[in-house]
Amino acid sequence: MLKFYYNPRSPMALRVWRTLLEKNVSFELFLMKLDGDQLQSNFLEINPFHHIPVIIDDGFRVLESLAILDYLEIKYPHPALLPREAQALAKVRMVQMVSTNELLPKAISLIFASDDSPKFIQAKQHVEKVLQFLMTTLGNSSYFGGEQLTLADISVGTDISLLPKLGINLSNYPKLNDWFERLMQRPAWQKTELSAEEFEQFRRVLMKLHQREMNRVNHAK
Ligand SMILES: N[C@@H](CCC(=O)N[C@@H](CS)C(=O)NCC(=O)O)C(=O)O
C-alpha cells in the first residue's frame, strides 16, 4: 500500500493528503513529528533534505509536494484533477506556482514577523496582491480549472486556509471567499482542516525550525 509520510499541520503535506482523499487512493499514514523525527537517519535515507511530504508507492519514492501531485494524477487518474485543454491546464499550473512561490512564503513570513514591523506590512501587501490576482483569475468559475476541482484548487486552497488564522480576511475577496467555502464543504477538507489550536502548534513548530535555521546560518558565519 502507498506510504505517506506527513504531519497534519504541514501545508505541503496537506496538499498531498487531500489529493489522496479526493482520488480515493488507499494509503498508510506515517506521522512525522517535526521536532526531530525528520532528522532520524532512517528518514534521512528517504529524504536527505529532511522534509515532508514524501510518498513511497510500490517501492517508488517521490519527494516535493508538486511532484507527488503529478505522480498521483497519472498513477490514479480517476477522478481527473488536471484539465486537458491548453488554457485551462496553463491556468492550473500558473495558480499552483503562484501559490507556491508568491503566497506561501509570504504567509509563512507573517508568522515570524511582529505585527507592525515593515517586514509584516510588506508581506501582508504582497499577500493581498496575490489574493486580488487569484480572484481575477478565478473569474466566475467554480474552480480554477473550470467547473471541476483541480490540483490548483487543492494547492492554493490549502495555502490560503492559513490566512484567516493570520488575521487576513477573505471577505474582501467575495468570489474567492465563495470558492474557499465551496472547498471547505468537501469531505476531504472537512476531515483534514486544522483547528485553531492545531494551527498554534504548527506555528510553534515553525518558530523552532526557523530558529534552528538562523542558528545554523549564524554558526556558519
Ligand atoms: N518544497 C517542499 C517543501 C517541504 C517542506 O518545507 N516541508 C516542511 C513542512 S511544511 C518540513 O518538512 N520541514 C522540516 C524541516 O525543515 O526539518 C515541498 O513542496 O514538498
Image (cartoon, rainbow, N blue to C red):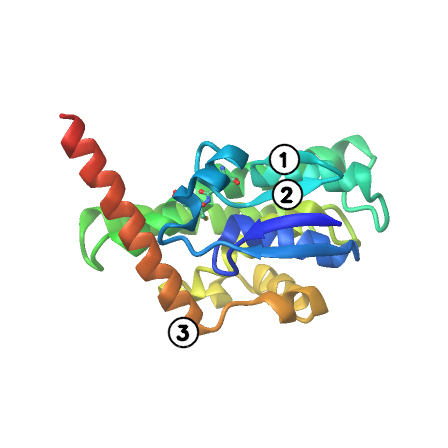
In-image side of 187 versus 212 (left or right): right
Residue drawn where x is 72% and y is 47% of the image:
2
Image: 198 above or below 52:
below
Q: Quadrant of residue 62?
A: top right
Mark 2 vs 1: CB contact within 8 A? yes
- Mark number displayed over residue 55: 2
Residue drawn where x is 41% and y is 66% of the image:
199
Q: Position of residue 148 (x, y in %)?
A: 79, 53
SS at mark 3 in the image:
helix
Image: 100 above or below 153:
above
Give the residue pinned by disc 1. 62
Task: Please say whether residue 135 is visible from this viewpoint.
Answer: no
Q: Position of residue 88 (x, y in %)?
A: 75, 38
Mark earlier in primary sequence (3, 1):
1
SS at mark 1 in the image:
strand
Tell me the crowding category of disc 1: few under 14, some 14 to 19, or many 20 or more residues within 10 angstroms, Cα based.
Answer: some
- Mark number displayed over residue 197: 3
Image: 168 above or below 103:
below
Task: Please say whether residue 146 is visible from this viewpoint.
Answer: yes
Amino acid at dot 3: Glu
Amino acid at dot 1: Val
Q: Position of residue 115 (x, y in %)?
A: 22, 60
Q: Quadrant of the C terminus?
A: top left
